[in-house]
Image (tube, rainbow, N blue to C red):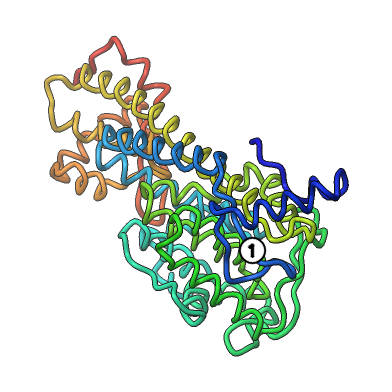
């Protein structure tokens, strides 16, 4: 990245600092916004660093679409669910919120009979909405509060009732933002009237089609963190909103990778906010947007690599299954469904799930499962009262040159 922050010039050359600020802020290619950072009007320089990254994101998004198209629909669906579980688990980890993959999976697959009372229910169902391409209204402060009620409020109250919003819509008191070492790095906007003013201006920017959509997503992500409208849950809210907006502009899988990439680059992520919050940076959002685009690029690159690797493995194990069951198409179909789930999914499959996905009768599925279990080709574990099954890929690979005979 060639772009140097204004704060980087401040101590080295005051004259250059002021000249560069004026040049950047007043440039015809800069966006100037109707909100401030500290006491300075916020702005963004549309430079080569920004344009190259937008181009790269769009190129990678096309490549990701091709990779996704080469994956069977059942495998892609399982992979999407796994990515959702990863995303929710990691977004909670970042916030220090304990959650397990099992409880997330139970809500996602409706296996938890009392899931509406589960503290994670709103968060899980909100991410699941992204798979269904549902629209979420993000136009007013009331829209933000309504989303918070759905997404985080129950969990916040469960963890600490004192963190429940106590203002008209948001918080009445001050709040500090801490990094991963619990060091205070920012104090959120205060009082509530100012929170509402800043958030209204940010939402107006978010819905302004005159600005590039990816730039709007990046800037709103920053502004939500800068404003920090709630006592707790701001990080989860910000990441979810960004994921939702990304799902509307890029391939939906990208929306389920943001928290993972942020956690992998947590020091950089905190630095993005710290540098942009610096008073000597004078409201310049360019550095933050560049780095946010880098996170999106890394997310897409990792998805492409992962899907390509899994698709090659699927072809490999699929060929083995074809050799094993060359005279039994239905047994091959059942086995191939299991292979897809093992490679792309997050948990095993029940006999009923296999029958539904494979469109093979229950009796044939049971027979094939027994056949595979007897030869140590499946892992079997209990899920409630049911058995669920996963392919034992290590043992399966040993049959590459064999044919199983009944």
**Residue at left offset 37%, top offset 50%:** 252
**Residue 201: quarter of image:** bottom right
- Residue 334 percent coordinates (x, y): 22, 35
359 vs 215: above or below: above
**Residue 94: quarter of image:** bottom right
- Residue 92 percent coordinates (x, y): 59, 58
260 vs 168: above or below: above
- Residue 325 percent coordinates (x, y): 18, 22
In the structure shown, which secondary structural element does the residue marked by tag 1 occupy? Answer: strand
Q: How many marks?
A: 1
Q: Residues within 10 Å of mark 1 (few under 14, many from 20)?
A: many
Q: Residue 118, can we see it?
A: no
Q: Nearer the viewer, residue 16 or 36?
A: 16
| Quadrant for the C terminus in the image | top left
**Residue at left offset 74%, top offset 70%:** 39
Q: Residue 150, can we see it?
A: yes
| Quadrant for the N terminus in the image | top right
Q: Name the residue furthest right.
A: 11
Q: Left or right of 172: which side holds 356? A: left
Residue identified by numbered label 1: 42
Q: Left or right of 79: which side holds 334? A: left
Q: Nearer the viewer, residue 150 or 384?
A: 150
Q: Left or right of 338: which side holds 126? A: right
Q: Name the residue furthest top.
A: 401
**Residue at left offset 49%, top offset 82%:** 142
392 vs 6: above or below: above
Q: Nearer the viewer, residue 21 or 311?
A: 21
Q: Nearer the viewer, residue 281 or 72?
A: 281
């Amino acid at each position: 990245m060639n772009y140097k922050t204004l704060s980087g010039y401040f101590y080295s050359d005051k004259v250059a600092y002021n000249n560069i600020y004026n040049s950047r802020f007043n440039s015809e290619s800069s966006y100037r916004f109707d909100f401030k950072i500290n006491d300075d009007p916020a702005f963004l320089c549309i430079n080569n660093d920004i344009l190259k990254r937008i181009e790269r994101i769009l190129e990678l998004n096309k490549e990701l679409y091709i990779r996704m198209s080469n994956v069977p629909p059942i495998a892609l669906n399982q992979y999407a669910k796994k990515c959702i579980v990863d995303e929710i688990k990691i977004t909670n980890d970042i916030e220090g919120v304990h959650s397990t993959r099992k409880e997330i999976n139970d809500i996602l697959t409706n296996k938890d009979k009392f899931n509406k009372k589960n503290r994670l229910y709103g968060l899980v169902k909100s991410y699941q909405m992204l798979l269904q391409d549902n629209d979420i209204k993000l136009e007013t402060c009331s829209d933000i509060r309504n989303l918070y009620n759905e997404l985080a409020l129950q969990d916040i109250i469960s963890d600490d009732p004192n963190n429940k919003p106590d203002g008209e819509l948001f918080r009445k008191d001050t709040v500090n933002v801490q990094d991963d070492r619990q060091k205070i790095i920012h104090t959120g906007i205060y009082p509530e009237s100012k929170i509402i003013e800043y958030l209204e201006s940010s939402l107006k920017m978010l819905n302004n089609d005159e600005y590039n959509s990816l730039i709007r997503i990046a800037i709103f992500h920053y502004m939500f963190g800068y404003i920090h409208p709630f006592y707790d849950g701001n990080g989860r809210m910000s990441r979810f909103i960004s994921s939702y907006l990304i799902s509307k502009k890029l391939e939906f899988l990208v929306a389920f990778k943001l928290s993972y990439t942020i956690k992998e680059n947590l020091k950089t992520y905190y630095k993005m906010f710290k540098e942009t919050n610096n008073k000597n940076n004078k409201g310049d959002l360019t550095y933050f947007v560049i780095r946010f685009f880098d996170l999106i690029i890394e997310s897409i690159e990792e998805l492409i690599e992962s899907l390509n690797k899994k698709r090659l493995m699927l072809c490999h194990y699929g060929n083995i299954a074809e050799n094993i069951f060359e005279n039994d198409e239905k047994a091959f179909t059942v086995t191939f469904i299991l292979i897809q789930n093992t490679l792309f999914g997050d948990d095993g499959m029940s006999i009923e799930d296999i029958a539904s996905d494979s469109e093979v009768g229950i009796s044939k599925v049971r027979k094939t499962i027994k056949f595979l279990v007897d030869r140590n080709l499946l892992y079997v574990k209990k899920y409630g009262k049911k058995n669920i099954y996963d392919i034992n890929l290590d043992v399966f690979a040993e049959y590459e040159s064999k044919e199983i005979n009944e």
